Amino acid sequence: MTNFSEKKIIEGFLNNDDIFLNNLYETFFPVIKRLIKNNSGTETEAWDIFQDALFIIFSKVKKNKFELTCSFNTYIYSICRHQWLNQLRKHRINKVEFIDCEIFIKLTDESDIEKEHILNLEYFLFREHFNKLDKKCKKLIKLFLKKLSFNEIAKKLNYKNAIDARRTKYLCKNLLVNRIKNDPKYKELQKDEKTN
């Protein structure tokens, strides 16, 4: 697995290949778990860091920005290491010695990785609060995001007219935005964005 070519890795992510993804977890997660646990972390934190690294890589693959200049093992380890060091700094956990268990590289695209990390967190925060909306609000927002007109939305969801559909969309959107803005995770994200 560690010798997979860039092409195989890209295909594995783009095709959502279960065998490929299972091999990723089996091969690389134990190393990341050891890294995080050796450096003041827990298995749960290691899992979160690993998942985040996979989302970052997947996002780069989708945007056609993924380029492998070292082994994939070194690449994913370096991303996880970078993310964990940032987390330690953010929580002001200063350890005298950081214990590495693998070779790593200095990432040339650290700012891109940080941006991807924040975008992933924003996406999951949106999804979390979107899923808490009632069915009608969720349907309305989905139809609106599909660029249906308010007349079409009104017909599909049995509103009196387009004005009623527009007003309800406004209320649903405001409810969603307010829930997100009142979430402590959102406030943490705002701090992260200012420091990057």
Image (tube, helix red, strand yellow):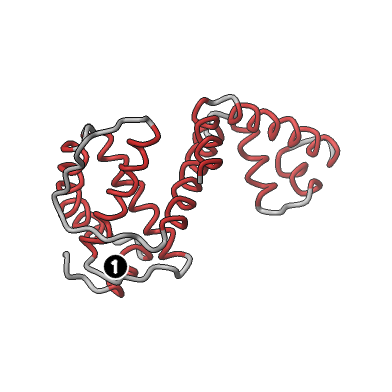
Figure check: 47 above or below 182: below
x and y percentages locating residue 43 in the rendered image: 21, 34
Q: Residue at x 73, y 52 (%)?
A: 148
Q: As drawn, which residue projects farthest toward the front?
A: 96
Rendering quarter of residue 193: top right
Figure check: 153 above or below 73: above
Q: Residue at x 19, y 57 (%)?
A: 23
Q: Name the residue nearer the viewer: 72 or 171.
A: 72
Disc 1 residue type (three-letter): Ile
Q: Which residue is mark 1?
A: 9
Q: Residue at x 54, y 26 (%)?
A: 183
Q: Name the residue nearer the viewer: 22 or 4.
A: 4
Whether residue 158 sits left or right of residue 48 in the image: it is: right
Q: Name the residue nearer the viewer: 74 or 22.
A: 74
Q: Residues within 10 Å of mark 1 (few under 14, many from 20)?
A: many
The image shows a total of numbered marks equal to 1
